[in-house]
Image (cartoon, rainbow, N blue to C red):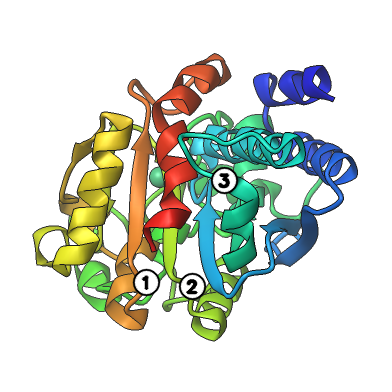
Amino acid sequence: MQTELKEILGGRFNYAALMQGVRILSDCYPFLQFSYLTESVMGKGIPMLRLGEGEKELYYIGTHHGAERITGALLLRFLQEFCELVVRGYPVFGMNLAYILKSRSLFFIPVLNVDGADIAANGAPRGSLLYARLVKMNGSEDFTLWQANARGVDLNHNYDAGFAEYKRLEPSFGITGGGPTRFSGEAPESEPETGALCNYLRFNRPRAVLTLHTQGQEIYCSGGDKCPLRVKTAAQRLAKLTGYKFAVPDGAAAYGGLTDFCMQKLGIPAFTFECGKGKNPLPQSDLPLLYAEIKEALFTFPTMF
Ligand SMILES: [Zn+2]
């Protein structure tokens, strides 16, 4: 199982690889519950995995952005190690994982933007009705840097947090409609991917939400310096565990994101990890290095809330 999963995570990480990885994990670890968040614009199921039955819920979310699909592989890698340690009964960083899962439920959405990840990995799907539209929005047939979903909406600008302000600013960033990056959509939660996630969060009110992006080796919390002290302290602790810098987002990154939405609209502490360093898309061969950087923070996160 280890070798097979390692190959999948180290190769071209597209939707097929994601689903293969999820199947291997759920076959191998029956206590890992597998369901779907919803369907994407192109009708793909967005896998969601759950560990534990406890009352305190925590969410790990990867791949809002197509070209950052290595974050999905990171979460599968983390899940594999987590499950294996549960089976063996070994502690990790001084923590007993079985005990953590008694009081907590951990939810994982390794790839929220399943269409975007596939478009960035494989290009626009030939023969699909969307092909011509995607090429037009992208301006070329090279989709390596594609971040948005299949309608050209940047999911991490589609949340109800500073949405109207960002909408006014979009033209100054050269954004006039759907495209590879930074278009916020017609309305907050207009996309099936964000709409379904927000409904889950509103209904389940988790204790905290952690979202993975690449790159920059930075950690954000909502509102930066304006966020409540306990949230800022948690962000600083996570920064310390990773060696990343605690930072405040600026420019376009400061609007419409999930981390801001969680804190501003739901009062849920939320954190963004900008994993690794380099130029997106980071090569899949960076996976072991990125995992080593964030591993302790991923394991510690549920115990902090
Ligand atoms: Zn991102």
**Residue 204 image offset from top left, x and y in percent:** 56, 80
Could you give the CA–CA distance between mark 2 and mark 3, rounded to whole angstroms? 21 Å
Question: Quick check: 208 above or below 291?
Answer: below
Q: Is mark 2 within 8 Å of ligand 1?
A: no
Which residue is rendered at x = 26% and y = 77% of the image? 164
Camera-side residue: 125 or 77? 77
Q: In the drawing, what numbered circle is on residue 262?
A: 1
**Sequence-first tag of 2 and 3:** 3
Q: Nearer the viewer, mark 1 or mark 3?
A: 3
Camera-side residue: 173 or 240? 240
Which residue is rendered at x = 33% and y = 67% of the image? 269
Residue labelled with disc 3: 96
Image quarter (top left, top right, bottom left or bottom right) of the N terminus: top right
**Residue 234 image offset from top left, x and y in percent:** 26, 54
Q: In the rendered structure, which amino acid carries the disc numbered 3?
A: Asn
Q: In the rendered structure, which amino acid carries the disc numbered 2?
A: Pro
Residue labelled with disc 2: 206
> Mark 1–mark 2 contact, CB under 8 Å?
no
10 Å neighbourhood of mark 1: few (<14), some, or many (≥20)? many
10 Å neighbourhood of mark 2: few (<14), some, or many (≥20)? many
Which residue is rendered at x = 51% and y = 63% of the image? 58
**Residue 287 image offset from top left, x and y in percent:** 54, 22
Question: Quick check: 264 above or below 95?
Answer: below
Question: Quick check: 121 above or below 37?
Answer: above
